[in-house]
Image (cartoon, helix red, strand yellow):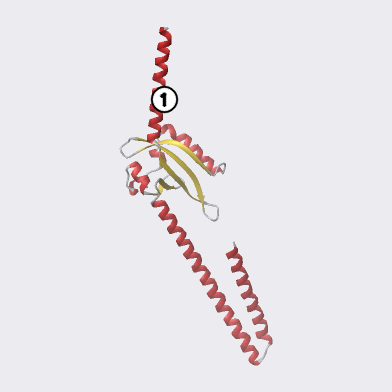
């Protein structure tokens, strides 16, 4: 914000100088006219150079930010994916590919609807609809994916929507954590709890 304001002030100042130089250029005879003409030319050149330098700085900053995002995205320890409006994966990282056993080319030919367990799909789509309506900014859900071999993978998914500067849709971004071991452990604990309760019930019946 400060940088934009400073750029505006400098550009505006150069514009005022140019206007003053033009006014005096047509009203002043002889050598003074040449001096004001020189000021006018210098001001124009300086303004062009400043704007060009500012543009280069913005491009370099944008490229740096893009490089940093790509590095963080690609080498994240958890799965990450960019998804278009139709649900198709447009960019996926190594961790996500490893989790599901697909190559990046294979995964970007699929939609999240195709690899989501049917029993979990409606809940996921409802969150996406809420994102699109602006009811929420992000969401988390535990759901199941099918990997390349058709096996069920439990994941914790965090999803959000990214917009372009003009407010139009850019993509969804998803962060995916494998929670299969945790879910299996909880299921086993639940089974043990049920067995113990059944044993206790049988003991009570016999007394």
Residue 34 sits above or below residue 80 on the image: below
Residue at 43% in and 31% down = 119
- The residue most toward the bottom is 30
Q: Nearer the viewer, residue 182 or 113?
A: 182
How many residues crowd mark 1 within 10 Å: few (<14), some (14–19), many (20+)?
Answer: few
Quadrant assignment for the N terminus: bottom right
Residue 76 sits above or below residue 67 on the image: above
Looking at the image, how many numbered discs can be counted on the residues?
A: 1
Q: Nearer the viewer, residue 175 or 105?
A: 175
Residue 20 image position (x, y, % from top left) = 67, 80
Residue 122 image position (x, y, % from top left) = 47, 34
Q: Which residue is mark 1?
A: 190
Quadrant assignment for the C terminus: top left
Residue 90 image position (x, y, % from top left) = 40, 49
Residue 196 image position (x, y, % from top left) = 40, 19
Residue 62 sits above or below residue 41 on the image: above
Q: Nearer the viewer, residue 125 or 55?
A: 55
Residue 178: quadrant of the picture: top left
Q: Is residue 109 visible?
A: no
Residue at 40% in and 28% down = 187
Give the side of residue 127 with respect to residue 114, left or right: right
Q: Is residue 95 visible?
A: yes
Helix, strand or loop at mark 1? helix
């Amino acid at each position: 914000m400060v940088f934009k304001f400073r750029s505006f002030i400098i550009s505006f100042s150069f514009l005022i100088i140019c206007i003053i130089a033009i006014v005096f250029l047509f009203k002043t005879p002889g050598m003074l006219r040449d001096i004001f003409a020189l000021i006018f030319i210098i001001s124009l050149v300086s303004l062009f150079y400043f704007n060009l330098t500012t543009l280069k700085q913005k491009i370099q900053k944008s490229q740096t930010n893009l490089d940093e995002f790509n590095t963080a995205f690609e080498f994240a320890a958890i799965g990450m994916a960019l998804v278009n409006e139709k649900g198709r994966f447009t960019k996926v990282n190594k961790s996500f590919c490893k989790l599901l056993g697909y190559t990046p080319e294979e995964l970007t030919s699929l939609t999240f609807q195709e690899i989501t367990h049917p029993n979990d799909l409606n809940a996921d789509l409802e969150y996406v609809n809420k994102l699109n309506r602006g009811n929420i900014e992000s969401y988390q859900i535990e759901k199941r994916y099918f990997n390349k071999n058709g096996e069920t993978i439990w994941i914790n998914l965090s999803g959000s929507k990214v917009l372009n500067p003009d407010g139009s849709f850019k993509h969804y971004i998803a962060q995916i954590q494998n929670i299969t071991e945790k879910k299996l452990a909880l299921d086993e604990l639940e089974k043990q709890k049920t067995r113990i309760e059944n044993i206790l019930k049988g003991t009570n019946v016999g007394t």
